[in-house]
């Protein structure tokens, strides 16, 4: 049996929404926990990326859900004030590969910065601790 929040498989039941409230609520909560001065900008600049954002209808569902959370929790149901609320969810057509593209651009920009890289030998000897040590030295 499948509904929007749970999947039944034999005797086990998995429900993502029961722990986190779903993606829409997580985005809404993150924005509401940010500094008040930045919230408006965050609502206007939600960008979807990665293969999991390719589900048909995801952008419109997020928009509907986040708007409803805002109406219920921020505006206390005052639909007249909802007209001033600006929400923009960007869903670029190439978003499936945006994470990879962003990583490759960053790697290209940082290719000349020695402190950004570690050798395989260093990683084999010390593991990820080498990366953490390099990161703390550059700050």
Image: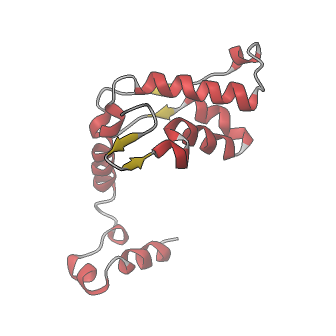
Point out residue 139 in the picture as x, y percentages from the top left corner: 53, 71
| Depicted 77 relative to depicted 105: above or below | above
The residue closer to the viewer here, 3 or 76, is 3
Check the image and tell me how it is coloured: secondary structure
Residue reaching furthest to the left: 121
Point out residue 36 in the picture as x, y percentages from the top left corner: 73, 40
Residue 51 figure quarter: top left
Point out residue 4 in the picture as x, y percentages from the top left corner: 44, 31
- Would residue 47 be seen by someone viewing this image from the given angle? yes
Number of numbered discs? 0
Point out residue 71 in the picture as x, y percentages from the top left corner: 70, 24
Residue 129 figure quarter: bottom left
The residue closer to the viewer here, 26 or 3, is 3
| Depicted 109 relative to depicted 22: above or below | below
The residue closer to the viewer here, 2 or 94, is 2
Q: Residue at x 27, y 39 (%)?
A: 97
81 left or right of 8 in image: right
- Would residue 34 be seen by someone viewing this image from the given angle? no
Q: Residue at x 35, y 50 (%)?
A: 11
Q: Residue at x 70, y 18 (%)?
A: 82
Q: If the image is split into quadrants, where does the N terminus sit?
A: top left
Q: Residue at x 58, y 29 (%)?
A: 66
Residue reaching furthest to the front: 11
């Amino acid at each position: 049996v499948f509904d929007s929040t749970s999947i039944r498989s034999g005797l086990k039941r998995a429900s993502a929404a029961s722990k986190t409230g779903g993606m829409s609520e997580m985005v809404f909560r993150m924005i509401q926990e940010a500094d008040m001065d930045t919230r408006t900008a965050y609502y206007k600049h939600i960008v979807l990326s990665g293969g999991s954002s390719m589900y048909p209808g995801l952008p419109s569902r997020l928009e509907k859900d986040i708007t409803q959370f805002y109406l219920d929790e921020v505006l206390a149901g005052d639909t007249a004030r909802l007209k001033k609320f600006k929400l923009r969810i960007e869903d670029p057509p190439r978003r499936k590969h945006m994470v990879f593209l962003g990583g490759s651009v960053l790697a290209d920009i940082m290719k000349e910065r020695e402190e950004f890289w570690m050798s395989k030998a260093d990683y084999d000897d010390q593991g990820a601790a080498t990366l953490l040590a390099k990161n703390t030295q550059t700050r």
